[in-house]
């Protein structure tokens, strides 16, 4: 297909909004530029899908993720945006609304909206609860309607305050896809009742994610951090200049045995990863002129606080491949001690590589290790270090199998636990599960309460499909009804067209 | 520990939101003294006598006898098991060969491993109280372990335990969930093979001690008599402590064997009708199923 054909298909696509069409056209234009120079070995590894640049584009002119210091912005105003310092809650919200449209990211929509409770608390003054509620509710609706991207991410907690509580209340009421929400939990700061409100929210709308505040805080310095996009933990006033990821499944398939994996294929492809990271971040920092923008001039971001993310995925398949497990069994990754141990060894090896390899543009001179959550084009390979979908054990075994990995992935790692809907009538169970997970060292706790195939009946887990086969006919309506509820709970099915984004669907597939 | 009691365990669930307050680790004990036509887990009724008839049914060769037929003990290899349940079909005694013996010490280790995630432990079945002294030992061990004593100890029962049995357990028990299978003795006898006098006595005894967490009613349209006897039933339930939950369960076919497979299952409409009837008669603490299968 010629470029003109592609442009024409994008322009006439019936499923895209004008804005989405503009985005895809821009991507095509960028893709027509030459790629930053890399060796033929890197090119080959990219072509065969071992290394992936996440479709960030040929000429990186904006960082992947940007985390501006919004507190500074509110306090000092902006010369560039012709804004005075904010004096009250209305002005603060208005100023944030304005700057969000000037914060770039790989999706063209800001992936970080700030630690909103901390940011807005200084402007609450003597406003009563209902007034605050009304203002935040309108703010929330505005965000979802004007920046329609589920990777746009708000942080709240760990302290108990009226903004934090009100955001949780609004979020559970509106059940919007956007913004994404992380609640920071610190056992020393967060009251149990507030965590309970957050976990009740999960039962209600599968949001927020609960972040293990002390672990994240230890990872970064006193200048702070934020959780952005899906599950990316990055330095505040900085961000990620690029994210390159390694397909561990393919690296394992190329190894003769486990020994060869650790001593040859893994170090070799990691080295190619670094070549690509260097080439891409060099272009951004040295050619694109991004770091001359007002965000830098006004001190809202610092070039030295940007780091490349060294992403990995397909851990489950890599382990199973090295152990010769071709199909899911009790000896597979996530289910067996030996397989899990091999996984931890791989994570420890990656950690060692990332901590000992310098980069030109990095956080303390280094990249940050990341368990990458997958993109829509991944087939037959599991995101990050997760257990393959459909073969997950019960949530507790699931957490116990993966907790050990979490110490290594400083720029983010996540498991999605699917909890059956019976938890809705017993939200205390979600609270307990979350606390248990964090006490074991999970960086982030995420649970989907779904009316999925798996349901519990008087103590036993059973599959609806099992019942359907058993009953024939009659159960179909139920399944449909439950499916519809899952869609309503997660908001994914019915709203997918509105959240099309560069990260979810990184290129135009005609 | 010498001569430590052990129990026959059919299954352990380390995450359940429907077996008591919060998150429960649930221990299902093998064996039941009721023979309910509607049983959803009939393979938990009998006790395996190692007859070996299940062995040929296993496609994965996960079952074996440690001694030649007749004198040995069935061995179940969990690594080989593909969970097809063919052995349960093959068993003439409704006794799963997939059980394991656990001592109190071994169960404490399982509980300790899962303790950050749970609010407490529920012993269920089969009919758990048939292995009463084991439960007493387990619960008293939990209550005297400094790191585990915060866990609540619950029992899921058919209510057939004798008064003296309850007295042995009460000092260590935080609460019980009791099944009431039918209102009329005759209906109960027809459904379960036993009358329900002891069930009522258990409910009242637990209520008087503040340990009746939940009464469970399995609604089988046209078979159980909760709808036809609704006035008497509601009058009885209303005299129970207001903290007691009344959980309505819907009859379904999954796992059921024999004539009950011909029975009509309980639809959402059947359940709503019963719940509305009970609500009108003043029952406020109803818990309804969150899914109908």
Image: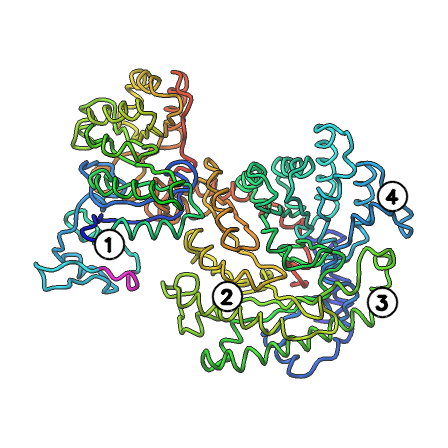
Of tags 2 and 1, which is closer to the observer? 1
Disc 3 marks which residue? Answer: A289
The local secondary structure at tag 3 comes to loop
Give B16 or B116, whichever is nearer the viewer: B116
Q: Could you say which disc has been placed on residue A380 in the image? A: 2
Q: Which residue is drawn at 67% across and 54% down?
A: A228
Q: Do labels 3 and 1 share a chain?
A: no
Which x, y percent locates residue B20? 38, 36
Classify mark 2: residues with Cα within 10 Å, few (<14), some (14-19) or many (20+): few
Disc 1 marks which residue? Answer: B98
Mark 3 and mark 2 lie on one chain; the one further toward the N terminus is 3
The answer to whether A427 appears left or right of A172 in the picture is left
Q: Do labels 3 and 4 share a chain?
A: yes
Task: For the residues labelled 2 and 4, say whether their Cβ atoms are less than 8 Å apart.
Answer: no
| Chain name for mark 1 | B
Mark 3 and mark 4 lie on one chain; the one further toward the N terminus is 4
Q: In which quarter of the image is residue A443?
A: bottom right
Question: Quick one: quadrant of the N terminus of chain A?
Answer: bottom right
User: In the picture shown, does residue B3 fall above or below A478?
Assistant: below
Instruction: Indicate whether residue A505 is drawn in magenta.
Output: no
Of tags 1 and 4, which is closer to the observer? 4
| Chain name for mark 4 | A
The answer to whether B85 appears left or right of B267 in the picture is left
Give B219 or A253, whichever is nearer the viewer: A253
């Amino acid at each position: 297909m010629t470029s003109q054909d592609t442009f024409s298909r994008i322009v006439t696509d019936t499923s895209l909004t004008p804005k989405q069409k503009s985005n895809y056209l821009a991507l095509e234009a960028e893709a027509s530029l030459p790629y930053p120079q890399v060796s033929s070995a890197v090119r080959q590894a990219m072509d065969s899908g071992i290394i992936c640049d996440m479709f960030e584009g040929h000429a990186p002119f904006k960082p992947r993720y940007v985390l501006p210091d919004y507190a500074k912005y509110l306090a000092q105003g902006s010369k560039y945006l012709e804004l005075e310092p904010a004096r009250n809650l209305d002005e603060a919200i208005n100023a944030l609304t304005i700057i969000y449209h000037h914060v770039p990211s790989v999706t063209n929509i800001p992936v970080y909206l700030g630690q909103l409770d901390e940011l807005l608390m200084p402007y609450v003054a003597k406003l009563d609860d209902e007034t605050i509620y009304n203002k935040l509710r309108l703010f929330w609706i505005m965000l979802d309607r004007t920046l329609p991207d589920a990777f746009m991410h708000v942080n709240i907690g760990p302290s108990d305050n009226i903004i934090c509580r009100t955001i949780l209340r609004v979020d559970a009421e509106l059940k919007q896809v956007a913004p994404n929400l992380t609640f920071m939990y610190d056992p020393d700061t967060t009251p149990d009742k507030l965590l309970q409100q957050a976990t009740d929210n999960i039962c209600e709308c599968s949001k927020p994610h609960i972040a293990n505040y002390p672990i994240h805080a230890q990872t970064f310095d006193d200048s702070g951090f934020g959780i952005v996009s899906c599950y990316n933990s990055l330095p505040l006033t900085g961000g990620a200049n690029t994210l390159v990821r390694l397909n561990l499944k393919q690296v394992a398939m190329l190894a003769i045995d486990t020994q060869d994996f650790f001593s040859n294929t893994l170090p070799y492809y990691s080295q190619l990863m670094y070549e690509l990271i260097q080439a891409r971040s060099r272009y951004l920092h040295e050619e694109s002129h991004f770091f001359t923008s007002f965000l830098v001039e006004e001190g809202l971001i610092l070039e030295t606080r940007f780091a490349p993310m060294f992403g990995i995925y397909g851990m489950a398949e890599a382990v199973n491949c090295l152990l010769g497990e071709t199909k899911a069994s009790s000896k597979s990754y996530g289910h067996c001690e030996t397989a899990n141990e091999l996984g931890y060894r791989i994570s420890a090896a990656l950690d060692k590589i990332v901590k000992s390899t310098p980069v030109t543009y990095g956080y303390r001179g280094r990249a940050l290790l990341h368990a990458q959550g997958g993109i829509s084009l991944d087939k037959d390979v599991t995101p990050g270090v997760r257990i393959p979908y459909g073969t997950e054990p019960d949530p507790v075994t699931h957490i116990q199998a993966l907790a050990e990995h979490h110490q290594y992935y400083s720029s983010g790692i996540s498991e999605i636990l699917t909890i059956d809907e019976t938890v809705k009538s017993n939200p205390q169970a979600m609270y307990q599960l979350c606390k248990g997970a964090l006490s074991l060292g999970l960086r982030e706790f995420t649970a989907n309460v779904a009316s999925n195939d798996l349901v519990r009946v008087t103590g036993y887990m059973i599959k609806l499909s099992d019942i359907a086969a058993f009953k024939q006919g009659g159960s179909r309506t139920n399944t449909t009804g439950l499916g519809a509820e899952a869609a309503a709970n997660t908001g994914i099915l019915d709203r997918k067209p509105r959240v099309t984004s560069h990260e979810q669907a990184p290129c135009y597939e005609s | 520990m010498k001569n430590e009691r052990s129990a026959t365990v059919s299954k352990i669930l380390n995450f359940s939101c429907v077996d008591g307050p919060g998150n429960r680790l649930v221990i299902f004990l093998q064996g039941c003294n009721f023979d309910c036509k509607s049983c959803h887990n009939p393979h938990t009724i009998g006790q395996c006598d190692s007859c070996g008839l299940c062995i040929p049914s296993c496609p994965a060769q996960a079952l074996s006898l440690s001694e030649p037929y007749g004198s040995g003990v069935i061995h179940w290899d969990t690594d080989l098991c593909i969970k097809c349940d063919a052995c349960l079909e093959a068993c003439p005694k409704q006794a799963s060969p997939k059980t394991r013996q656990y001592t109190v010490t071994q169960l404490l280790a399982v509980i300790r491993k899962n303790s950050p995630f749970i609010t407490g432990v529920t012993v269920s079945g089969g009919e758990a109280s048939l292995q009463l002294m084991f439960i007493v030992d387990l619960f008293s061990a939990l209550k005297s372990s400094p790191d585990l004593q915060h866990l609540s100890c619950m029992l899921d029962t058919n209510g057939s335990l004798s008064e003296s049995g309850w007295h042995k357990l009460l000092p260590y028990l935080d609460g019980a969930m009791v099944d009431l299978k039918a209102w009329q003795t005759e209906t109960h006898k027809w459904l379960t093979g036993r009358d329900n006098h002891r069930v009522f006595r258990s409910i009242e005894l637990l209520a008087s001690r503040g340990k009746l967490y939940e009464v469970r009613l399995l609604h089988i349209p046209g078979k159980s008599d909760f709808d036809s006897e609704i006035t008497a039933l509601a009058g009885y339930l209303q005299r129970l402590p207001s903290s007691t939950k009344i959980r309505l369960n819907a009859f379904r076919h999954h796992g059921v064997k024999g004539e009950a497979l011909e029975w009509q299952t309980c639809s959402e409409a059947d359940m709503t009708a019963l719940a509305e009837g009970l609500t009108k008669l003043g029952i406020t603490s109803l818990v309804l199923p969150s899914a109908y299968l």
